[in-house]
Image (cartoon, grey):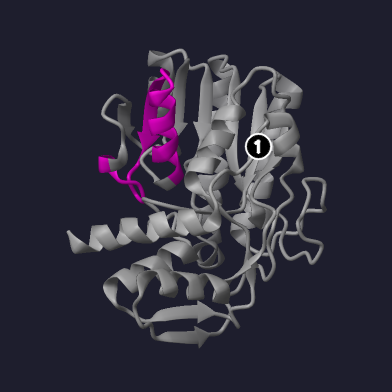
Amino acid sequence: MNILVTGGAGFIGSHLVDALIDGGHTVTVVDNLSTGNRAYVHKQAAFYELDIRHARELEDVFARSSFDIVFHEAAQTLVPYSMEHPKEDADLNIMGLLNVLELCRKYAVKKIIFSSSAAVYGDNDSVPIAEDTLLRPTSFYGLTKMTAEKYIQMYHDVFGLPYAILRYSNVYGERQGSHGEGGVVYVFSKALARGMAMTIFGDGEQTRDFVYVKDVVQANIAAMGSQIPSDIYNISTNIETTVNALKEILVYFSQLSAVVSYADARPGDIYRSALNNDKARQVLQWRPKTKFIEGLRATLDYFSEEESQ
């Protein structure tokens, strides 16, 4: 198939592009490189350095190709940034998405697959959280993801555009970065590789559902099928891990002494987070295959090697 990946030079997007090309698909990448890395883009992918908010330039890309599938990974993904810059967050995550949706409609794309987030749920003690749980985002980032989902569903209802919305839990792995797609696994791994102090915001007992990037990629590929109904799917492990436990595991793997400090919790951060992935298992026939220990070791090794070069 002929496929477009927005944000395809980023952390998740670049891994997705690799897998799609390995699967025999023709892939085009659109990325403005504000947080992505050109070096991560597969050599066989067509690449356009442009911003999805630039509608005319984006339409030129759609007009040159007849895309079957669009994976929309381009986004502002940092919760703290969204709390300080809500207008910029909304501009990319909502207005940029609308450009993509309108072109999908105009050029008869067969399906859009959207990367959403556990942030749409907000704080909820009833974990792991299922897809039909009331959405109560606590950050502007979560709010824009929730709003984006509603636009996608409306494009389906009004224009018949098929979709799959994938709500990721906390994705980690190789190529994760400090700018648009940095997470606590990246921050701790990088600190250990550089011999720097580690800072935990809050008491460290907050939990996250850590899912390995290559498992997330396989969920995206599973969602491509024409037989997959337009719906929302949690992409997760169902498992809560505290930030303190994450720190202990990474320190053990690194065999390094680490200075750890605690700071005030950040506005918008969720305290407990784990997602129920039963629907993805049943409908997408997907499940996370990478054990947390294996994924963490691979991630830490990657950043340690990167620092040594």
Q: Could you tell me the amino acid type at mark 1? A: Ile
Mark 1 neighbour density, 10 Å: few (under 14) some (14–19) many (20 or more)? many
The image quadrant that residue 124 belongs to is bottom right
Magenta span contains residue 99: no
Residue placed most toward the observer, 303 or 229: 303
Q: Is residue 81 above or below residue 164?
A: below
Q: Secondary structure at mark 1?
A: strand
Q: Is residue 83 left or right of residue 194?
A: right
Residue 289 in the image: state x and y as whole percent.
57, 43
What range of the chain is rendered magenta? 12-39
List the residue tagged with mark 1.
Answer: 165
Q: Quadrant of the C terminus?
A: bottom left
Residue at (48, 66) in percent of width and height: 184
Residue at (34, 78) in percent of width and height: 256
Residue at (77, 46) in percent of width and height: 131
Number of numbered discs visible in the structure rendering: 1
Magenta span contains residue 22: yes
Residue 33 in the image: state x and y as whole percent.
32, 45
Residue placed most toward the observer, 8 or 89: 8
Q: Is residue 304 left or right of residue 89?
A: left
Residue 227 in the image: state x and y as whole percent.
70, 18
Residue placed most toward the observer, 168 or 46: 168
